[in-house]
Amino acid sequence: MKKTIYTTAFLISLCIALSGCSSRPNEESMDTLISRVFSLAGKQYAAMSRNLGEGKFPRTFEGGDSLVTSDCKYWCSGFYPGSLWYIYEYTRNDSIRVLADKYTKMLDSRKYSTANHDIGFQLNCSYGNALRITGDSCYREPLLTGARSLATRFNPIVGCIRSWDFVRKGCDWKFPVIIDNMMNLELLNVASDLMKDPGLMQIAESHANTTMKNHFRKDYTTYHLVDYDPENGAVRSRQTVQGYSNGSAWARGQAWGLYGFSMMFRQTHDAEYLRQAENIARMLLKRLPDDGIPFWDFDDPAIPNTVRDASAGAIMASALVEIASQTKNKSLGKKCLEMAVKQLRTLAGSDYLAKEGENGGFLLKHSVGSKPGNSEVDVPLTYADYYFLEALLRYKTYITND
Ligand code: GLY
């Protein structure tokens, strides 16, 4: 697996950038904040495991008393084991490692799934982190088999992996690709490195290049869904499913794009991907509200009288910390890091972070699954917690590398 190499020059410039993010008098230091969140996370996630039925994964918590669960096929099933691995990475608590291993291995059968693109989320967050953190080769094979399964959805004429096989009522999609799909490319890159076979990474690069060309508007906001003609690769339509309108900037979609291109730069070293991530970051830095947490869609005319999406804020924070470590533009890097810190401080504050014993064991409140679908609006979600923990770990890693 390729790893980011931190040069001395980078570390020096990051330190300078960080000096702009240091705590104000009486403000909690980031070290203390990170320790506080991981201590809470260990307790919340262990408690949550005691309320999960056999074979079940957490999905959300509703009505103040109901833990909603899923089976392993749901697109989010990898986030719970993934968060457990992050908690283990920080705390080195062996009982958390036992849980992380158990919930990871409950996903083994996903490696054969060719039904949609979500296998990347499912396997890379779980098995990918397990292998990275422990180095235990028992976690290797599901990543390789899973990546081959994902690659079966690639169409070389389109140049993309097909996201979904279902067709939404009223639509006539032939080959729908959603911006979220950028996240699944990490599994291909990880497997490509493990196998020393460039073929899977070439698929990831083709998908990212095609997405860069067809998903983005001139202002670097992204459409949610692009439908292609699988016979000739032509774009048939550009739409939304989870956003306010076809032309709007759905917050989590912008977050997936930001993260996806920064991840592609880390794994391929192709500067075009960093350029794309930097341009998306510039757009977000202009549009994010003062506390850093986006409303669910940047273009909802009801803003500010509508809901925030903590999950989008957490994904952006994780990506912005990484972009701060990647960009050669010191001014942009400083702004990215300052925004990420702002987002992390907001999420770790009492408006968003649950108290111990509350929120069904989840960490963050106030995320949005699908507002147009009236599904999971203003609730805790596994992926908000996962990217929040990841962002905190990335922040810590980058500082302590100095
Ligand atoms: N499909 C993943 C999401 O809702 O962002």
Image: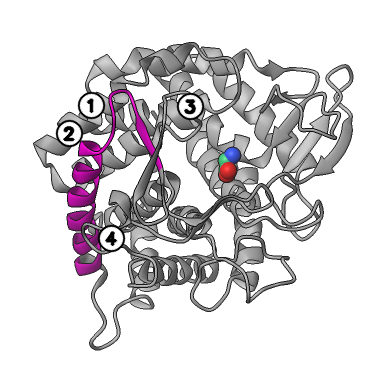
Quadrant for the C terminus in the image: bottom left
Relative to 366, is 267 above or below? above
Viewer-side residue, 263 vs 78: 78
Secondary structure of residue under mark 1: helix
Q: Amino acid at mark 3?
A: Leu
Amino acid type at image mark 4: Ile
Residue 237 located within the stretch drawn in magenta:
no
User: Percent from the top left, x then y, of residue 335?
Assistant: 50, 71
| Relative side of 176 to 91, left or right | right
Numbered circle sitting on residue 399 = 4
Residue at 11% across, 41% down: 93
Tag in front: 3 or 2: 2
Q: Which residue is at the far bottom?
A: 25
Give the mark nearer the N terminus: 4 vs 1: 1
The magenta segment is 32-59
Cβ–Cβ under 8 Å for marks 4 and 3: no
What residue appears at the point 89 percent right and 29 percent down from the top-left corner? 234
Dot 3 corresponds to which residue?
187
Depth-wise, is mark 4 or mark 3 nearer the camera? 3
Q: Are marks 1 and 3 in contact (CB under 8 Å)?
A: no
